[in-house]
Image (tube, helix red, strand yellow):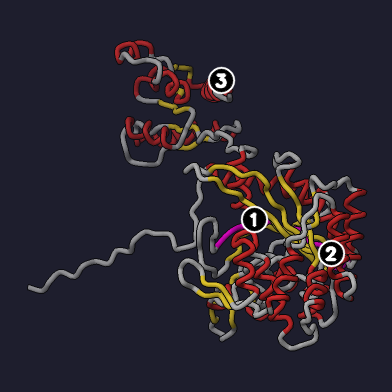
């Protein structure tokens, strides 16, 4: 007798770096997106949607994880032998869209967009391979007024989401100032390997919050080995060059003017540094006019951003509070949004410079932070009213009830399983239904329906300990005339609204 072949059954598991979200978390994030979208629209931005896939050469390689497979991008070859990639942000697809439709667009072109993006990165706590962003960008404007506007808009988004001033900070720097620093350090800005060395320095500095000064020094020098034993090559700067970079990124002051003075003494004599300082001065003046004081926006030389396409001002929104997670561990969320100027990105397609600047919030990260801070608590949300099916031959009658409730604006559902009444009520409990509608033979004969108030029932069940008292009182159940179904259900929903 042949041995029976074992049936393969795949193990249900979510891939590393992916996250399943359901129910209140999804609703809460949609509500948060709607709030941010409202601020974006108040500034005159219009929506745009682009596809999840782009040709790999159109996306370009600008991610910080250069040592990862595909340089941080999920890619595959199509049947026409062209390489496609899942978008790693919403900015690179925007650049392609603008280049493709350039002649027909009103310029400056202002758009906002939200959706998932994918990065082939090493997953970790709070670091996912798929996450949602909501962006706003202005394309076709060289003036720093566009950057100042985005910085102010991000601050307004924080407050629209319920965060008071002082609990967040928008921190601003300029990539040109860093060019001036590297020029002063003796790096040749015209050499073939300058951009690669510059990006290595940028990505080292970008890890200051996570690795601290000692970790950044290693990455600016020969390299660093992490706790897992993985080695990241460094920028190979000399010790005096490392000291200069560290003195730059550790400039701190409570006033934007003081930071500008410190930077002027360090890089003001270089061409790139002077240009970057002039742009920061213009942004400072505009922010002051918009009442964006230091309690909302600060200048911080440690902000460099890891993406390779930034060319000028860069900024991040940080949450300042240290809070405890569900395990009692103190955590600091840090950056929940970022942005910057990318004047060269569209030039890859057009051959001519098209100035642009944009900002972005990480939706899941921001939502999680707001929940822990208590400024965006999930609102209690009832499930639908459930109409039970006690007689399978009368499904059309029950469906008619559901239709009446829906037409009256009540969220309602017909039970579509095959179980009996007790299991149906348990199902309604799991669905967080506020009310179930019951019409069995007795109710049908009397021309009535029974409404079971599950909210009141749950409350009273914690107060009544005697089963006999519970059965006799039937406190959360009432019978009404069939024609009063909608009115009766609405009365119960109104009673339980709070």
Q: Is residue 135 magenta?
A: yes
Mark 2 vs 3, N-terminal side: 2
Q: Is residue 426 left or right of residue 364?
A: left
According to the image, label 3 marks what residue?
495
Could you say which is closer to the camera, residue 417 or residue 112? 112
Q: Quadrant of residue 208?
A: bottom right
The image's mark for residue 263 is: 2
The image's mark for residue 66 is: none
Residue 128, given in percent of the width and then of the height, sits at: 54, 60
Q: Is residue 495 above or below residue 174?
A: above
Binning the other alpha carbons within 10 Å of mark 2 as few (below 14), some (14 to 19) or many (20 upward) gives: many
Mark 3 vs 1, N-terminal side: 1
Distance from Cα at disc 2 to Cα at disc 1: 30 Å
Residue 81, given in percent of the width and then of the height, sits at: 56, 86
Label 2 secondary element: helix
Q: Residue at x 52, y 72 (%)?
A: 225
Q: Is residue 150 above or below residue 277?
A: above
Q: Is residue 56 above or below residue 170?
A: below
According to the image, label 1 marks what residue?
362
**Which mark is in front, 3 or 1?**
1
Label 1 secondary element: strand
The range drawn in magenta is 130-141
Q: Is residue 15 left or right of residue 162?
A: left
């Amino acid at each position: 007798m042949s041995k029976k072949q074992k049936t393969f059954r795949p193990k249900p598991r979510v891939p590393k770096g992916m996250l399943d979200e359901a129910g209140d978390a999804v609703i809460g994030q949609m509500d948060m997106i709607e709030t941010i979208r409202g601020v974006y629209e108040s500034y005159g931005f219009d929506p745009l949607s682009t596809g999840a896939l782009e040709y790999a050469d159109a996306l370009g390689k600008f991610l910080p994880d250069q040592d990862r497979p595909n340089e941080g991008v999920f890619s595959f070859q199509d049947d026409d032998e062209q390489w496609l990639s899942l978008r790693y942000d919403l900015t690179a697809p925007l650049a392609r869209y603008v280049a493709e439709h350039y002649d027909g667009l009103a310029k400056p072109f202002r758009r906002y967009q939200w959706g998932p993006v994918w990065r082939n990165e090493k997953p970790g706590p709070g670091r996912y391979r798929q996450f949602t962003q909501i962006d706003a960008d202005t394309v076709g404007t060289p003036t720093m007024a566009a950057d100042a506007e985005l910085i102010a808009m991000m601050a307004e988004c924080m407050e629209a989401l319920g965060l008071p001033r002082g609990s967040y900070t928008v921190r601003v720097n300029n990539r040109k100032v860093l060019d001036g620093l590297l020029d002063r350090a003796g790096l040749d800005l015209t050499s073939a390997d300058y951009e690669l060395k510059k990006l290595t320095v940028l990505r080292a500095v970008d890890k200051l919050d996570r690795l601290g000064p000692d970790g950044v020094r290693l990455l600016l020098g020969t390299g660093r080995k992490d706790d897992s034993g993985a080695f990241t090559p460094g920028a190979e700067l000399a010790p005096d060059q490392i000291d200069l970079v560290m003195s730059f990124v550790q400039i701190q002051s409570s006033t934007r003017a003081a930071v500008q003075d410190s930077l002027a003494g360090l890089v003001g004599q270089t061409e790139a540094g002077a240009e970057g300082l002039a742009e920061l001065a213009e942004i400072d003046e505009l922010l002051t006019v918009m009442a964006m004081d230091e309690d909302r926006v600060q200048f911080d030389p440690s902000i460099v951003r890891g993406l390779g396409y930034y060319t000028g001002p860069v900024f991040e929104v940080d949450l300042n509070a240290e809070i405890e997670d569900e395990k009692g561990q103190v955590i600091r969320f840090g950056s929940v949004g970022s942005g910057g100027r990318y004047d060269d990105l569209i030039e890859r397609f057009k051959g001519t410079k098209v100035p642009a600047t944009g900002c972005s919030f990480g939706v899941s990260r921001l939502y999680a932070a707001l929940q822990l801070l208590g400024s965006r608590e999930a609102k209690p949300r009832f499930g639908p009213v459930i109409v039970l099916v006690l007689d399978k031959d009368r499904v059309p009658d029950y469906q008619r009830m559901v239709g009446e409730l829906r037409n009256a604006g009540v969220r309602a559902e017909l039970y579509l399983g095959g179980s009996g009444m007790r299991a149906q009520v348990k199902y309604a409990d799991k669905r967080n239904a506020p009310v179930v509608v019951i019409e069995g033979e007795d109710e049908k004969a009397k021309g009535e329906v029974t409404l079971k108030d599950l909210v009141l029932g749950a409350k009273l069940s914690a107060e009544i300990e005697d089963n006999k008292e519970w059965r006799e009182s039937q406190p959360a159940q009432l019978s009404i005339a069939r024609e009063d179904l909608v009115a009766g259900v609405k009365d119960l929903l109104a009673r339980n609204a709070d």
